[in-house]
Amino acid sequence: MLRGMYTGAAGMVVQQNRLDALSNNLANVDTDGYKRDTPVQKAFPELLIRRMSDDGVRQIPLRSFPVGSFDVAPVVGKVGTGVETNEYFTVFSQGSLRQTDNAFDLSLEGKGFFVVDTPYGERYTRNGSFLIGPEGMLVTKQGYPVLGEGGPVQLKLNNFVVDEDGVIFENAALADDPLRLVSMRENEWEETVEVDRLRIVDMRNTRYLRKQGDSFWATTEESGEAFTMDDGRPKVRQGFLETSNVNPVTEMVQLIEVNRAYEANQRAIQSHDQMTQKLINEAIRL
């Protein structure tokens, strides 16, 4: 009977973990580049219920002495022993692109990550909301430099453009409207200078990347080291930001499911407690 209470308690812990993940997803619904988390549950092994009135042990005789035994007690059912949270799985599906018309906003259309140099080492992000730092470098909102293939990206204010391959150009003709690369005249192109190309990386198994906060990820032994993408690079969209891939309606529906499952496990524990109390009280009277 106590096993049922333990099973219900394990179910309540799992639902609490689901609630934490769903709440975090909803809190980051407006965070650019955020990827939602989904908790994955693992069931404990089921126990077989055998008939108690029959020990089921049969000996194998050989002449005058046994040489072994086997269990033939009939199985009359199974009982579950609960579940636990196995891992938090990050869904790396593409978020929709939101147009901002800000030249410093970049997004990736496809697999890959921007590389950011932080005091803790290189970190990776899908949040392309960048700025120009006081030293003329392209930086994140936290002030960390964005890396190109030649190192930190050095820019001048409002005179650069980024093409779909991530190549950064500077041209004085872009100072008034940095997004009008397609309408530049031929003589204006002659003054264009290639600055660098954004370093875009991928990993062997992104499933095992570790979240670091502020939309940053770090590699782990299971994810493999980051490698620069040459083939299959995502398209870089300047003037767009990738929104989170959280669907608020789906998350709210799952919150209702979690609440009901939590209450069901709670009622199961209360029922087992009442039955245990009744058993003890009646046994004492006998």
Image (spheres, rainbow, N blue to C red):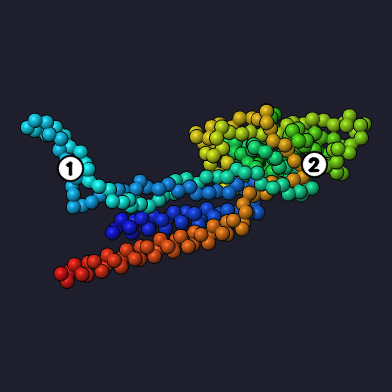
Q: Which residue is mark 1?
A: 57
Local secondary structure at mark 2: loop
Q: Earlier in the sequence, mark 1 or mark 2?
A: 1
Q: Position of residue 148 (x, y in %)?
A: 69, 33
Q: Position of residue 124 (x, y in %)?
A: 61, 39
Image quadrant where residue 27 sits: bottom right
Amino acid type of the residue tagged 2 in the rendering? Leu
In the rendered structure, find residue 217 and report the number of the disc placed on it. none
Q: Position of residue 198 (x, y in %)?
A: 71, 34
Going by the picture, which residue comes out furthest to the front?
63
Local secondary structure at mark 1: strand
Image quadrant where residue 209 sits: top right
> Which numbered disc, 1 or 2, marks the residue closer to the eye?
1
Local crowd size for mark 1, using a 10 Å CA cut-off: few (<14), some (14–19), many (≥20): few
The span from disc 1 to disc 2 (Cα, nearest Å) is 85 Å
Q: Can residue 124 be seen? A: yes
In the rendered structure, find residue 157 and report the number of the disc placed on it. 2
Amino acid type of the residue tagged 1 in the rendering? Val
Going by the picture, which residue comes out furthest to the bottom?
285
Quadrant of the image containing the N terminus: bottom left
Q: Is residue 268 above or below residue 222?
A: below
**Is 206 left, or right, of 181 in this rendering?**
left
Q: Can residue 216 be seen? A: no
Local crowd size for mark 2, using a 10 Å CA cut-off: few (<14), some (14–19), many (≥20): some
- Kindly identify the residue that appears in the image at 85 percent across and 41 percent down: 180
Going by the picture, which residue comes out furthest to the left?
64
Q: Position of residue 218 (x, y in %)?
A: 56, 39
